[in-house]
Amino acid sequence: MRYLLIICLLFFPISASGFTWPETTKEKKVLFANAAGLAAITGWGIVNWDYFSTTPSAKNEGWFAGNTKEGGADKLGHFHASYTLSHFLGHTFENWGYSQKQGLKLGALSSFAIMNWMELGDSFSDYGFSYEDFVMNALGCATAYLIGTRPELDKKIDFRIEYRPRFDTADVFTDYDRQKFLVALKLDGFDQVTHPLLKYLELHLGYYVRGFSHGSIPKRTLYAGIGVNLSRILNGFSLNTLSTVTRFVQIPYTYKAFENDL
């Protein structure tokens, strides 16, 4: 998930409190932001990922089978990064004057362009273009728009990543042995759920892999869980920014999982 690292580096300054855009239209801001992002990715790729060092190539990386490089965790990483970036840029564009729906549409399109510009750059390096990564990027952007523009879905569904850090690796973004990916169904989004305590619960369906990156016995695990809706709790304390973060990041030890190895 090296992509998510670059996303954070590139776009956090866009919405930083001290950043001031020159006087211009919101359309030009979107254009400039995308152009700056693509230029920065190109430069970073040339310096760090050997872009344009080889002729274009493509690789069949597979999906979620046990004989793939990362057991499919890297594909879910692409989905989650595209999904998160779509929301982040959509919110940024909304702050620049677009409606919520327009902002998220532009955010999803921008995310699609940025993520797959990196995929195109990969084709000119030893990484190679991955059709599977391209598809997951597209699905992440489309899902962000589909859910984000439909309040009845947005209040019910979150897509999250969980990471339990360790300190013997420098690249946390590809440390799939410490990551989990999940979709959470929040009970407070259902009008049929009226009990006040039940509104603080959510149901999880998740997937993770172990042993693919570190030479041990590879394992793929699917799990279901019951968790605490931290977003609702944090909103109750007016911690809105932290509440938003927990819609994309699963906090460890806040749920009970029931697992099944594949």
Image (cartoon, grey):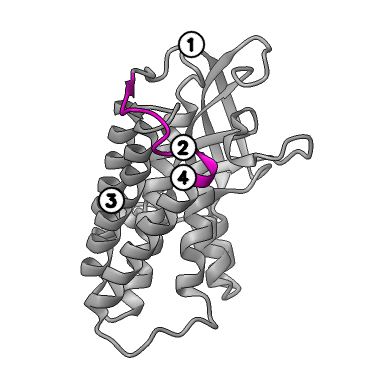
Q: Relative to the observer, which residue lies in front, 8 or 51?
A: 51
Q: Residue 164 location, x and y as percent?
A: 68, 40
- From mark 3 to mark 4, how far is it between C-alphas? 16 Å
Q: Is residue 46 magenta?
A: yes
What's under tag 2, amino acid-wise? Answer: Gly
- From mark 2 to mark 3, how far is it between C-alphas? 17 Å
Q: Which numbered disc flags the more N-terminal residue, 4 or 2?
A: 4
- Which numbered circle lies on residue 215? none
Q: Are marks 1 and 2 in contact (CB under 8 Å)?
A: no
Q: Relative to the observer, which residue lies in front, 30 or 84?
A: 30
Q: Are marks 2 and 3 in contact (CB under 8 Å)?
A: no
- From mark 1 to mark 2, how far is it between C-alphas? 17 Å
Choose mark 1 or mark 4, whichever is in front.
4
- From mark 3 to mark 1, how far is it between C-alphas? 30 Å
- Which numbered circle lies on residue 113? 3
Q: Which residues are magenta?
A: 45-59
Callout 1 environment at 10 Å: few (<14), some (14 to 19), or many (20+)? some
What's under tag 4, amino acid-wise? Answer: Gly
Callout 2 environment at 10 Å: few (<14), some (14 to 19), or many (20+)? many
Disc 1: which residue: 66
Q: Is residue 11 magenta?
A: no
Q: Is residue 168 above or below residue 242?
A: above
Q: Are marks 1 and 4 in contact (CB under 8 Å)?
A: no
Residue at (32, 63) in percent of width and height: 34
What's under tag 1, amino acid-wise? Answer: Gly
Q: Secondary structure at mark 4?
A: helix
Disc 4: which residue: 45
Choose mark 3 or mark 4, whichever is in front.
4
